[in-house]
Image (cartoon, rainbow, N blue to C red):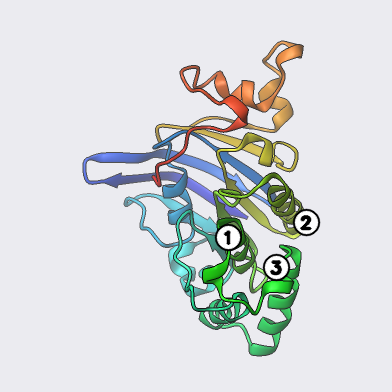
Amino acid sequence: MLQIKNLNKHYGKKQALFDFEMTFKNGVYGLLGPNGAGKSTLMNIISDNLAPDLGSQLCWNGTDITKLGSKFRRKVGYMPQQQALYDNFTARRFMMYISALKGISTAVAREQTEYLLSEVELHDVMDKAIGGFSGGMKQRVLVAQSLLGSPELVLLDEPTAGLDPKQRVIIRDMIHKTAKDKIVLVSTHIVSDVETIVDEIIIMKQGRIAANGTVEQLVSVLPHERRTLENAYMLHFPEKNTAGGAIDENSSV
């Protein structure tokens, strides 16, 4: 269980997160919000790649993550929104490289590499150079590497960016399967990618939680004929254009 209390983050004079509080248990959580909402900042802090402001509390099963240190980081699988890949590496070599960084034994790394690349339908090209992959294929490699080591907490920042509809279904199904015994937090600007698989939605606006709950809870305030997650989102951002179910999201904050 991940408990977050009084989470604040400043970048100089700009505050990106305001008193964020949430308790995460096993399941899938969808993180929705427009530019500058604080989604990527939140994920960077949870993954221990970014320090929060003093007074913020992040606890894993009751223990502050700063006290757990590397023990906590080994429990986390993280796919950042922007991550450079080594074009001269094959997909297999990249997965083995990440496994080594995570301290995974060679035997386990080989087994998990085969399995995960098969799950994202890249098994047939796993020994080809990543530099020749399409954007969608590279994105699937990044999703696969986040699951190496069987992490208990998985953070996926825009996992379906650049994927075609078929590829998005592959990733969505994988997320659903993965979440049976993990906490999975998915940031996305494509509402349909999470609407059918999440246990809870968190809508963020200007660094704060604007609304959270199950899809059913969020849409219950709408007239019956308008009960979709996209329409529930629009209640908080009436000025945004979300045609096609996509929220404008270009910022890494």
Depth check: 43 or 59 in front? 43
Residue density around tag 2, few if under 14, some if 14–19, many if 20 or more, within 10 Å = few
Instruction: Work out which quarter of the rendered image holds the N terminus and state it.
Output: bottom right
Residue holding disc 1:
134
User: Whole-percent x and y of residue 199?
Assistant: 71, 41
The quadrant where residue 35 appears = top left
Q: Residue at x 62, y 22 (%)?
A: 232
Residue 122 has which mark?
A: 3
Q: Residues within 10 Å of mark 3 (few under 14, many from 20)?
A: many
Q: Quadrant of the C terminus?
A: top left
Tell me whether the residue at label 2 lies in contact with that at label 1, contact meaning CB atoms closer than 8 angstroms.
Answer: no
Which residue extends farthest left? 13
Label of residue 154 in the image? none
Residue at image coords 58%, 60%:
134
**Residue 202, x across and y down, in percent:** 58, 36
Q: Residues under labels 2 and 1: Cα distance?
A: 25 Å
Q: Nearer the viewer, mark 2 or mark 3?
A: 3
Which amino acid is tagged 3?
A: Leu
Q: Are marks 2 and 3 in contact (CB under 8 Å)?
A: no
- In the rendered structure, the answer to whether residue 161 lies left or right of residue 182 reads left
**145 left or right of 120 in image:** left
Could you tell me the amino acid type at mark 1?
Answer: Ser
Which amino acid type is marked by label 2? Answer: Lys
Q: Earlier in the sequence, mark 2 or mark 1?
A: 1
Residue corresponding to mark 2: 177
